[in-house]
Image: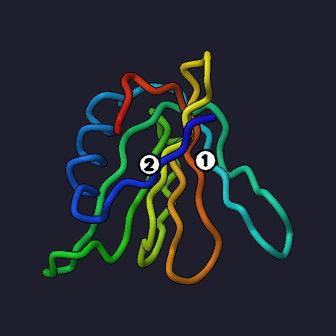
Amino acid sequence: MRSYEIPSEKWMDFIDRFSRDHVGWPVTIEVLSKESGPQNLVRDLPLQGLSFDTRGGSRPNTLQVTAGDNPSENFSHVVELPLHIRVAEEENSAQGTIEIEPAKGSPTLARTLLARKWA
C-alpha cells in the first residue's frame, strides 16, 4: 500500500479535483473511534462530494463528506478542524482511502475507487 499526506496548502485543490472526478462513485465512510473501534457510517453510496467551510479565513474549519442520491439515502458527515489529510492507494488495485484526521476526535475514512494518482 502506498500512502502519502496532502500538504495543507493543497487541500482545497485536492478536495475540489477529487470531488469533481468522483461524483457518483460508490463511497464507504468510516470513523475510527478509539473507544468503540471502526464504525461504518455508510457503505457504497454514491459520492456527492467533499467540501470545506473556511468561515471567512483561509484555513478550513470543517470538511463535509456527502453521499447518497435520493432523500431516503442521503448522508452528510462533518469533520471539525481537519489537521491532516492522507491518501492510501492499494497496490495492484484501483481502491483507495482518504483519511481525514481532526485536531480532536476520531479520524474519518472515505473509501472509494481512485481515478488517478494524486501525488
In the image: residue 16, left or right of residue 96: left
Q: Disc 1 vs disc 2: which is toward the camera?
A: 1
Q: Residue furthest top?
A: 92
Which residue is rendered at x = 45% and y = 36% of the image?
47
Q: Quadrant of residue 81?
A: bottom left
In the image: residue 47, left or right of residue 15: right
**Which residue occupies the foreground of this view, 50 or 13?**
13
Q: Amino acid at mark 1?
A: Ile
Q: Quadrant of residue 16?
A: top left
10 Å neighbourhood of mark 2: few (<14), some, or many (≥20)?
many
Question: In the image, which disc is placed on residue 107?
Answer: none
**Which residue occupies the foreground of this view, 13 or 25?**
13
Write down the residue under mark 1: 29
Which residue is rendered at x = 50% and y = 60% of the image?
100
Q: Is residue 40 above or below residue 32?
A: above
Image quarter in which the C terminus is found: top left
Q: How far is disc 1 from disc 2 in space, using C-alphas?
A: 9 Å
Q: Reading the chain from its start, which is encountered first: label 1 or label 2?
A: 1
Residue 55 screen position, x and y as percent: 21, 79
Mark 1: which secondary structure?
Answer: strand
Residue 46 screen position, x and y as percent: 49, 31
Q: How many marks?
A: 2
Q: Amino acid at mark 2?
A: Thr
Image quarter in which the N terminus is found: top right
Q: Residue furthest right?
A: 36
**Which residue occupies the foreground of this view, 53 or 119?**
119
Write down the residue under mark 2: 66
In the image: residue 38, left or right of residue 67: right
